[in-house]
Image (spheres, coloured by chain):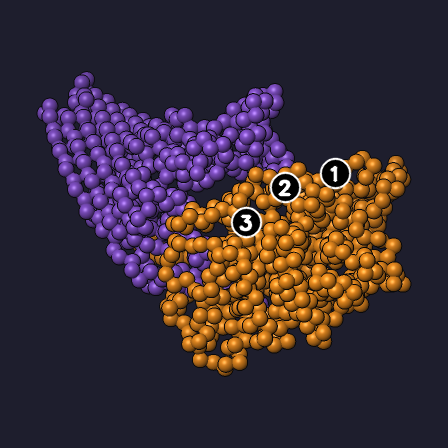
Chain colours: A orange, B purple
Amino acid sequence: MHKHTIALVGAALLAGLPACVNLDEDVVTGLTPGSYGTQPVFESLVNASYEPLRSFYAQERGFTVTEFGTDIFTKGADGSYKYINDYTTQLNPTAQFVQDTWVDFYRAINTTNAAIDQAPVVVMDSALKARRVAEARFLRALYYFDLVQMYGPVTLALHETKSPTTEATRAPVDSVYDAIVADLQYAESTLPAVQKDYGRATKGAAQHLLAKVYLTRIRDADSTADELAKRQAGDFANAADYAQRVINSGQYALLPRFKDVFDFANERNQEVIWSIQFTTDPLTTGPGNSGHLYFLAQYDVWPGMTRDVANGRPFKRFRPTWYLLGLFDRTKDSRYDAQFTRVWYANNAANIPKNAQGVPKFGLGDTAVYVSTTDADTVLARTKPYTVFTPRAYLGQASPYQDNMFPSLNKFHDPFRSSINETRGSRDFFVARLADTYLIAAEALMRDGRPAEGLPYINAVRRRAAIPGHETEMELTVDQLTLDAILDERARELAGEITRWFDLVRTHSLLSRVRLYNPDAKNNIKPFHVLRPIPQIQIDRTSIPYPQNPGY
Amino acid sequence: MVASGGSLYRQVPVGHVEAGLRSGRLDAPFPEEMNRVVVDRLATHWFAPTPRALENLRHEGADASRVTVTGNTAIDPYQTEGSLTRTMYSFLDQPAVGFRPGTLPNPDLRWEKTTQMDAGLEFTMANNRVSGSIDYYRADTRDLIMERQLPPTSGYSNILENVGATRNTGVEVALATLLVQDWHGMRWNVEVNAAANRNRIVRLSSGLLSDPGNKWFVGYPISVAYDYQFGGIWQIQDSISGEAQRYGRRPGQIRVVDQNGDGKIDQNDRIILGTTFPKWTTSMTSRLDCKGLDLSVMAVARLGFLVQDSLRNGGQSTLAGRYNNIYVNYWTPTNPSNTEPRPNAAQENPDYGGIRGYGEGSFIKVRTITVGYTITGGRLRWMRARSLRIYASALDPFMFTQFRGLDPESALNSGVPSYRTLMMGVTLGI
């Protein structure tokens, strides 16, 4: 009797439990780093070099370290990373995003190095091989570019790690930039204008990035000396040259209307030079584009509203500053209305307020929440049945509106997610788009002492942004073309596109602009904040001294 | 696992290789954890890969003299060759599968070797009413195999390596006494076991004396807490005296001990706060029989070890007002608490909030108390039974500790406290 019981239980257990069930790890046994060299493995290394883009771009990590703590966005409500906006002591060598960016990008760099090192022994069509190497070098340059901008002097590894090492040193910023430029020049000369697989790096992407690298390259900590050194080194001329190659390539065009650039139905439009790919397929989209979460105000807690897929999941992290909202001349510039959502329509009959007779004060589809642009509308709050939010400048508030309700940047809005709380959006994330290239050209030419040549490029972007009929009014004159004007224009055009903190650092204007425009950061920010701290785990695990950035 | 069940039934001794490995969660990794827990219960001899596994077994009541620490067996075939990890991207909305270097090859990996010296003394006296043993052991492990953390700039996070040499020394004392043999039908047995184990790193193969990245320090145990030391809360008078400002702090924030007194808190102010290995573990079993009545009590103790209280070091004590928080005596200008910082809605976690959780974890637990009464003989003839036992038993009924969290024992693992269980039962012998 007992024997039978044991046998039966045993059989049941054996049937129910095949080997180890561990779904996290995806290790291919037998395929080891030492044994590859075939075309499929080489190509999969190149494919793998793209994946870490998704750990930073279109994620909270990338948005937080480039939009928080700038002149255009400050903290909203909730979230674990307010210290990155506030520059408090929690922005330290153990800060999560500071560490994760470092870890993921160096892993990515090792992957690109593995592909590049392998290439000579791989037997395949030589043109295709060169193209794949160029993609890997483009990606390696991009990872290093982000690293050097965030951390300053960083370890420069251009070959795959073959054996365990605990030694690492920090290479001077100049050598890192030299390596980036060499990679991008190779990529620029090798990559095709169009790739059959949309999403792979192209010649235009390399040219755009190279222009930005030349414009960004810091040659001196002092802004005046830096300007001079960059001009003498030809950085501005080079930046202008590569930006103009993109613009004149005939491959790309500014769309006629600004609002169409972020049209979800047309995300592979002519203005997009290179984008990080996301799909609606959960198997291939990775973490998805989660940008739809962070800029959205808490629309769903007011009368007549409930959270739904169409309106989005509001994380209310990034609140526009007075400065950003004040940048737009709304009588001429279409970009304010195009990129900020300010009205939400009733979608919940159950909580629409009723009058004394029990009749709902408004119906489904009527305005339920209205974020007004002007304090003149404060009176509306009393006369209209819907909820009205005004900027409340008259209160002397440090930031407009309130921490959970504000005009919401909608560039990443995603109504096609599978459920209300799904974080994985499917929009591609534009890393290089032509309006940015135009602004790079304008800035490079101006800083190279050729403002008249630069002017048409910024005016092209401004004319395109005009409310129809106001194109001429939008144009700047040569006298108006200053670095501040360009930074203002970049804020209007590129808000939220993971570039602002970098723009401020490279123009030596992070401190001045944050002190002027970011009320939560202005009292904490110090000169050393132009670099992020080196992650403590890097310092701890390196057996020789690995210097921390000053101030941390 | 099934085989061990069968063996138990046939009373064949079962030896378990890789005994004592615990994740603390029965369902992860699945089914290994469950198999190991079950088989360890059924086994009579245990081959534990690490001193920690030995500790786990001892803790679960295994007879330590039947546990052998074998060294690491968990080296999979081909593991030294490195591997690739699958990645996923997409081009043109089509899957773009990739492979990236996943783990670094280490062809130099050698067997871990342990030499062990034991000395023991067994004794009986007073007509066998007192018996016991004293064992001393010293185990020297060379080429200890562990995951070594690598600088992220290498592109890898860790590698399995022969990281150095450790020494385990320990004493185990066992004493069994028959305190009362037969006094008005009463019999009372008491058994006491005590063990002390000291684990320390003798040498690191990197040649370093301290390796903060792995938290390995020569002369210290292999598992230590290396962190900042909690020094109370900055008070208003510290601000008046200017001391708080010197550290860039405000009243109400957590004060970190400035170990080197250089006027700033940085990586050099981290110290070894302690180890999670207990200095002593002991257990005591007492059994009293008297005219069919039996009472047995088993108690265990772990003394002298450090735990991280998962309630206090983070998520349950954020003092940010966004999530539920455990009730703590937080600082306000009028309540100068020195244990918990001020609430602050502008941050999700207090600065250095994690170091609040470290604390002494010593505890004594009464593991079981069982009371039973057994009837035998003629009175049971009507129901054709030979014996009838009625019993009540309590599992984990009492704990004595100064630990502030839920359970210092489980704080080592998942933080979920052990259950207090009351059972009553009837056993009929036929």
Q: Amino acid at mark 2?
A: Ile
Q: Amino acid at mark 3?
A: Val
Residue under the point 60% across and 54% down: A220
Q: Kindly check if marks 1 and 2 are in contact, taking CB atoms under 8 A apart as contact.
A: no
Q: Amino acid at mark 1?
A: Ala
Whole-angstrom CA distance, mark 1 to mark 2, is 16 Å
Please tell me how crowded label 1 is: few (under 14), some (14-19), or many (20+) other residues with Cα within 10 Å: few
Residue under the point 42% across and 76% down: A121
- Residue A191 versus residue A284 in the image, above or below: below
Could you say where residue B57 lies in the image, as x and y percent from the top left? 30, 41
Could you say where residue A400 lies in the image, as x and y percent from the top left? 77, 42
Left/right of residue A394 with respect to residue B357 in the rendered view: right
Could you say where residue B77 lies in the image, as x and y percent from the top left? 31, 62
Determine which residue is flagged by label 3: A98
**Location of residue B76 (image quadrant):** bottom left
Badges 2 and 3, same chain = yes
**Would residue A239 be visible to someone looking at this image?**
no
Q: In which chain is the residue bearing label 3?
A: A
Nearest the eye: B208 or B335: B208
Please tell me how crowded label 2 is: few (under 14), some (14-19), or many (20+) other residues with Cα within 10 Å: many
Determine which residue is flagged by label 1: A398
Nearest the eye: A365 or A532: A532
Residue under the point 74% across and 50% down: A408
Determine which residue is flagged by label 2: A525
Question: Given this view, does label 2 or label 3 mark the residue nearer the observer?
Answer: 2
Left/right of residue A291 with respect to residue A302 in the rendered view: left
**Would residue A234 be visible to someone looking at this image?**
yes
Whole-angstrom CA distance, mark 2 to mark 3, is 17 Å
Q: Sequence order check: which comes first, mark 1 or mark 2?
A: 1
Q: Kindly check if marks 3 and 1 are in contact, taking CB atoms under 8 A apart as contact.
A: no
**Location of residue B75 (image quadrant):** bottom left
